[in-house]
Image (cartoon, grey):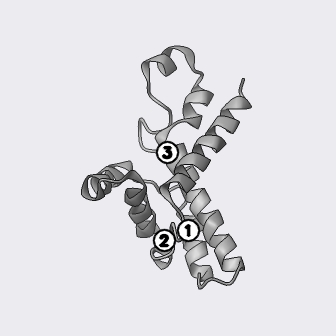
Amino acid sequence: MAEPGTDRYSHPLGERYASREMQAIFAPAHRYGTWRRLWLALAAAQHELGLPISQQALDEMRSGLDEIDLIKAAEYEHRFRHDVMAHVHLFGDVAPAARSIIHLGATSAFVGDNTDLILHREALTLV
C-alpha cells in the first residue's frame, strides 16, 4: 500500500489538467516500484545466465516489490546523496538475500532512463 501522497504525481499543472490515472503513473511509488521491477528482471536474467544469484534472492525481491518506505528512502538519500543508491539500500532492507546483487552491473541510467520510457509508454495508453 502506498503512503499518503505517494500514489500520484504532484505538480500544479498536474493538479489542474491531469487525470488521477495519469497522476498515478508518474507517482513516486509507481516510479520506484518500476525501478524494483527492472532490478528484478536484471537479476532474473543474470541468474538464468549463470551468475551466482540465488532463488531466495529472487523470491525476496519479488515479494518486496511494493514495500517502499519513502521516508526511509529520503533518509538513505540524505546519507548517500544519491537517489538510486538510496533505493538500492531500501530494496535490500526488504530483500536481504539480494542485498549484494541489487543493481549488479547496472548504471543509474539503467533504472532512470528505462523507467522514464516505461512510464511514458503507460501514459500514452491514456491519451
Looking at the rendered structure, the secondary structure element under dot 3 is helix
Count of marks, rendered view: 3
How far apart marks 3 and 2 lie (CA) works out to 17 Å
Label 3, residues with CA under 10 Å away: few <14, some 14-19, many ≥20: many
Contact flag, marks 1 and 2 (Cβ < 8 Å): yes
Asked which secondary structure carries label 1, the reply is helix
Task: Please name the amino acid that badge 3 sits on.
Answer: Ala
Task: Give the image location of residue 3, x and y in percent.
Answer: 42, 44
Of callouts 3 and 1, the N-terminal one: 3
Give the labeled residue for mark 3. Answer: 29
Q: Which residue is mark 2?
A: 95
Which residue has dot 1 on it? 61
Q: Is residue 93 above or below residue 65?
A: below
| Relative horizontal placement of residue 76, taking residue 23 as reference (left or right) | left
Side of 61 where 122 appears, left or right: right
**Relative to 52, is 120 above or below?**
above
Q: Which class describes the residues within 10 Å of circle 1: few (<14), some (14-19), or many (20+)?
A: many
Work out whether mark 3 precedes mark 2 in sequence or the reverse, and give the earlier one: 3
Q: Is residue 59 above or below residue 12?
A: below
**Separation of residues labelled 1 and 2 (CA atoms):** 5 Å
Q: CA distance from mark 3 to mark 1?
A: 16 Å
> Which residue is located at x 49 percent, y 79 percent?
97
Say whether disc 1 or disc 2 marks the residue closer to the N-terminus: 1
The three-letter code of the residue at mark 1 reads Met
Q: Where is residue 126 drawn, in percent x and y? A: 71, 27
